[in-house]
Amino acid sequence: MANTLGDLKAKIASDIERDLTDETTSTRTWEDEIESSIFDAIALQKSKQYWFMQQPTSAEITSSCSTTSSYVSEPTGLVQIDSLRLTVNGQKQSIDPVSFAEMESLHDGNTTDTGEPFNYCRYGQRVRFYPSPNNTYTLTWSGLFDDAAMDDDADVTVWTTVGKGELLIRCQAKVILYRDYIKAYADVPAAIAALKEVENALDREHAKRVGTRRLQARC
C-alpha cells in the first residue's frame, strides 16, 4: 500500500490535531509547517541502512567511465556504495574502495597510469579510479539510494509508503513539529520514544532481510 505526500501530511495533521488550512503565521499554514518537517525528517533518516533504500531493485543501476577522465559522476540519489563493479569482457569485476589520501598517493601526479580500474574513492559527488580507465567500461552500482524528491501532493516515494518509510517519517516529523514549531516540549519525550520504537522495528526487519542467519565456523 502506498500513500502520497498529501496523504502523509493529512495523517500527521490528524496526529497532532491540526487543520492543514489553518494559518500558523501570516504567510504559512500548518500544511507548510508539516511539509517542511517531512522533508527535514527525510534528510535526517536517509543515510541510515534500510532495505527499502537498497538498489538495484527491478533493474541494475549502471553508468560508464571512459579514457577522458579518471573521474565519473555518481548516480543521482546515491547515499552509500555497497559494491561497485566494472564490466570487462562481459564479466563484472569488483572494484575496491580506498581513502582519498590513498588515491592521491596512487596517482601521485602521474596521469599516464591507465588500465582496468581496480580501486576507487568517493570525493564530492564523484568517484575517482585507479588506474585511469584505458577504455570505456560499464559500471554497476549497488548501495543505498535516496528516492526522488517530492514536489507535489500526488508524489509517492519509499518515504510515503506504508510498510517502508512512512511510519518512520511520520514519527520523526512529529518530533520536529512538537520541538521546533508547536513548542510543546512536554510532548517531545513521548514522540522520541515512539520514533525509537519504529527505528528498532525497522532495524530488526532490515537484519532479517539482509542477514545470513548462519553461524560462522571458528578456526
Image: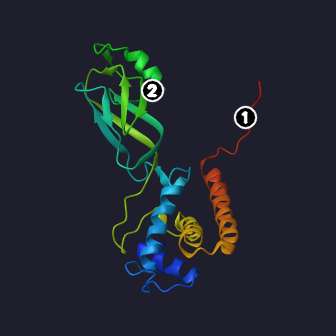
Identify the residue position indicated by label 2 in the image.
Answer: 100
Residue 194 position (above or below residue 17): above
Foreground pick, 152 / 36: 36
Left or right of 191 on screen, residue 102: left
Residue 107 position (above or below residue 185): above
Q: Which mark is residue 80?
A: none
Q: Residue at x 42, y 64 (%)?
A: 157
Foreground pick, 101 / 208: 101
Query: Picture coordinates of residue 192 (x, y %)?
Result: 66, 65
Foreground pick, 97 / 171: 171
Q: Residue at x 22, y 26 (%)?
A: 68
Whole-number angstrom distance, CA of label 2 to CA of label 1? 33 Å
Q: Furthest residue to the left?
A: 68
Q: Furthest residue to the right?
A: 218
Number of other residues with Cα within 10 Å of mark 1, as a class: few under 14, some 14 to 19, many 20 or more: few
Q: How is the image coloured?
A: rainbow
Q: Which mark is residue 216?
A: 1
Q: Are marks 2 and 1 in contact (CB under 8 Å)?
A: no
- Which one is in front in this view, the residue at disc 2 or the one at disc 1? 2
Give, as a three-letter code, the residue at label 2.
Answer: Phe
Residue 6 position (above or below residue 169): below
Give, as a three-letter code, the residue at label 1.
Answer: Gln
Query: Picture coordinates of residue 87 (x, y %)?
Result: 35, 31
Label 2 vs 1, first from the N-terminus: 2
Q: Residue at x 46, y 81 (%)?
A: 24
Query: Picture coordinates of residue 86 (x, y %)?
Result: 37, 30
The number of numbered badges drawn on the structure is 2
Query: Dot 2 lies on which element?
Result: helix
Q: Quadrant of the C terminus?
A: top right
Q: Residue at x 31, y 21 (%)?
A: 132
